[in-house]
Amino acid sequence: MAKPLELLQGTLDMLILKAVSLGPLHGYGVLLRIQQVAKDRLEIQQGSLYPALYRLEHQGLIAGEWGTSEKGRRARYYRLTASGRRQLTEQTRKWQSMADVIAAILNASPEEV
Amino acid sequence: MSTVARLRSWTRAVFRRSTLERDMDDEVQSHLEHRAEDLVRAGHSPAEADRLARLEFGPVAARKDDMRIAVGLGLVDELHADIRQTLRKLGRSPSFALTTILVLAIGIGATSAIFSVIYGVLIQPLPYPQPQRLIALTHRSQSSGQDRLPASTALYFTYRDHNRTFESVALWAMDRSTITGAGSPEEVRALETTFELLPMLGVLPQAGRVFASADDQPGGAPTVLLTDGYWQRRFGAGDVLGRRLIVDGVPHEIIGVLPRSFRFLRQDADVVLPLQPNRARSFVGPLGENGIARLRPNVTLEDASRDIERMMPILVSSFPPAPGTNPRPQGLRPNLRFLQDAIVGDLRDVLWVMMGTIAMLLVMACANVANLQLVHAEGRNHEFTVQAALGASRWRIARGMLGENVLMALIAGALGLGLARVALSALLNMAAGQLPGALEIRIGWPVIGFAIAVSIISGLLFGAAAAVRHTRPAISSALGASGRSVSTSRESQRIRSGLLVAQVALALVLLLAAGLMLRTFQAVRSVNAGFEASADVQTVDISIPAATTRDFKTVIRKFNDIHDRLGAIPGVDAVGFASRVPLGRTGPSGGFIVEHVTPIGVAPAQREFRFVSPHFFETIGTPLIAGRDFTWADHHESRSVAVISQRMARREWGSASAAIGKRIRMTTAEPWREIVGVVGDIHHESLVEPAPDSVYLTLGEPLAQFMSRTVTFVVRNSHLGSQDFVEELQRAVWSVDGSIPLANVQTLADYYGRAMERTALTLLLLGVTSGMALLLGLIGIYSVVSHVVSIRLREIGIRLALGAQTGSLRRMLVGRVLILLLVGLAIGLVASTALAGLMEPLVFGVTPQDASTYLQVSVLLGVAGVCASYLPALRITRMDPTAALRSQ
């Protein structure tokens, strides 16, 4: 198995928004969901998740609430807010067009230039 | 993403901090537990799983910091930590912090209190629009040398009609008027003014109108304005417009009420009357009213002076000389002053001396605190060195120290403002009669701003020495020495010696100022005022207005009757009256021609004249040197007689007895007055100026009926119980005429006290300031010596063990301080040459360079300094050499 990729600067917030858009999750759950989807190809500093969650909550994009996890433990669940959903749509669109542009540049053949 | 959301989140984070912290802890814990459970399921042992989960999470404290920053707590936390750290440091040495704050609070408080007075009196503009264009029309007489002469109606008309530099000109005078009608008769303070004054000052009535030109014409319908205070007091703030007020027996229509904010110079008026200057009865000559003018824009005082010089010939050609006076003008020249300067007067000198001395005291307080700081910092040298070794920059350490100082200084400043408030009310009480009422003195924003600025500057100032000294790290040596260093403190020793010298020098300057003022006070006290300033002599103003008693002969009769009735009161030893009492209001003056002496055609010298009753001199204790006192017959029969002062008799005829029988007169048209008596010199105007040449006249003089319907009775009584006595006086006066009120009830001692007030106030302030300076200086010396003793304890111990005498060791320590003391005294003596110039206008009977004062003060400070240094040196005597060796 190849060495997992390091997360690109500034993409963690977007991934968290996407993760909680599929349903409320606690912090560890967010981590698991991202890794599950990424099939372990992404390396995420576990500790860095929480400052990001707090920042997003501070910005009003997600809302946290205490609940009980599937394992019967106390955990803080985050859900996407309306403005969080708008932000996610916006960022996804931006990311995709950015990815297209970069891909186009990287795939360019000499005759296209 | 909205700002509102962030603000809500931030507020929650700040104000529900404990919830946030608990949530963070719980959440991290929850993560670790979930992860560990998964790891156990993957086959790790529980202990191993726990360890791995923590490892994967990373440093918890750092993460939590990041989380705090994420919700906007970064700056808040940093600031909070700084303040907490500073407070903790100060809390660790509370006596140091407390002493520093107290010493500074006294310094800042005193400075702020004096500044609030300076601001209110000298800096804050007068409460009128464009006050810098208002000037007082004062004049100088070349023949008599008087330089604060007022104006006259003739000058008013001349200036009003012919000037090129004034926007408007007005005339005013303060008088007392009697209000009769409903209730008992009442004497009120009346401001008489031409119609231009109130518009010139921008005063708008709160009801009705102010004077128009028509109200101000001679013979115009009588009108009156009420001030807010009198309106409230007399009419309960009721509807008064159009009602009649009987002023001096004449009904006046109330046309308006002035606003509450109305203040005019030092005067506190009850009513305002139109002056109604009469052109037909205006003469070149006597000056009795005050002139005020508003300059046109961009006109200077010099322009206005030149303009007045130009108008002087117009004055002489437009108005006749006063009936029978010498037709030649008296060499009148303008001597204009800005209104603010005219109000402040000679207070300016006192205030600047005060500010200077208080600033010196503040510098001393700072030096003292800097000293403390150095000692304190020495104890913390290790702490600073560790900080430097751990990589803190020099600037970072200095910032920490200065921040601490500024914080302490600001606390001291807040405390100082509280002190200033207390000090100011005490100060204003003492100076009640001295400070112009038109100005407002209080602790307002400018003063608070001043206090804050002074706090910050002094915080930086007193911390600078220690910061410079202790941020130059010599890491290895200081760490190694671990506080047992003697040599490291050599540099701070030098700084502290410098501070000590500065404190001694400043203390000397302040003590010198106080010493000079004490001499002045004694000198003024010892001036023979020429009368007995006794509390046994009651004074009371009584006036008989023309409206009730037209004929002046009857007025004299009534005064005579009142005189006799008052004399009949049991316990009364003597009674008299005069148009002005000594040290009261300034009297009129006129040129007196001396028979066979004054050359024909030359303007005679100006002399003050007063109208006095028989027995007046006897009552106030002024000796009759030659001749006789006035009799009632002199008054009733209008005999042409005069009494003069001894000084004038000597000047004109060589001796008092030579003056008897000689003759003087004011004008060539009037008969000669024979001098019948010579009395002792009286300081009418001020104690510190020579007694003026004075002429005393009878009420039988034609002039008296214009000038003396109000007189001040003096009653010497030996029985006490003031209020009862005043009632007895009142009954006696009312038995002659029930419409006469008594006003301005005082004693001669009160008049004397007011004349002493400026000197006494200055002495008191300087005394307190220099006392504090002496104390600070001595504390400084004491602390330097005791510090030297404590850091040289080991050395002293060795010396003692080797057999040194305690006496010689003490001399060694004290000798060092003595040298510093002498240097400080020398510098102080040099610095006080600057003080001499500042003190010049304040001293009397002593020169600002008075050698004996300098010597005494220097010796006092030197001896006190040696005592202060000897005290800690005494410790050596009681010292056990072995204990000293083992110390530190």
Image (cartoon, coloured by chain):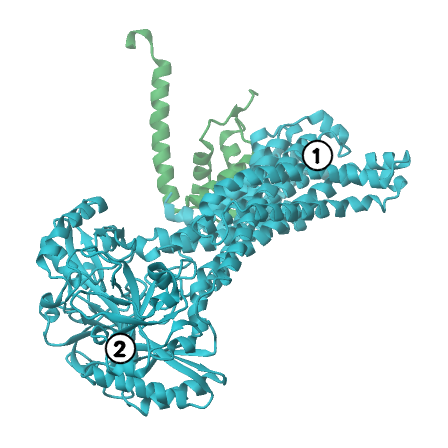
Answer with left or right where residue A20 lies relative to residue B594.
Answer: right
Which residue ends up furthest to the bottom in the rendered image? B735
Helix or strand or loop: what does disc 2 sit on?
loop
Q: Which residue lies furthest to the top in this view?
A: A110
The 10 Å Cα crowd at callout 2, few under 14, some 14 to 19, many 20 or more, is many
Query: The residue tagged with tag 1: helix, strand or loop?
Result: helix
Q: Which mark is residue B699?
A: 2
In the figure, what tint was chain B given? cyan
- Amino acid type of the residue that numbered disc 2 sits on in the rendered structure: Leu
On screen, residue B838 versus residue B181, left or right, reads right
Sequence-first tag of 1 and 2: 1
Q: Is residue A78 visible?
A: no
Shown in green, the chain is A
In the image, what residue occupies the spot 26% across and 86% down?
Answer: B557
Task: Identify the residue under disc 1.
Answer: B382
- Above/below status of B243 relative to B95: below
Query: Does B76 sit above or below residue B759?
Result: above
x, y percentage for residue A76?
Answer: 54, 48
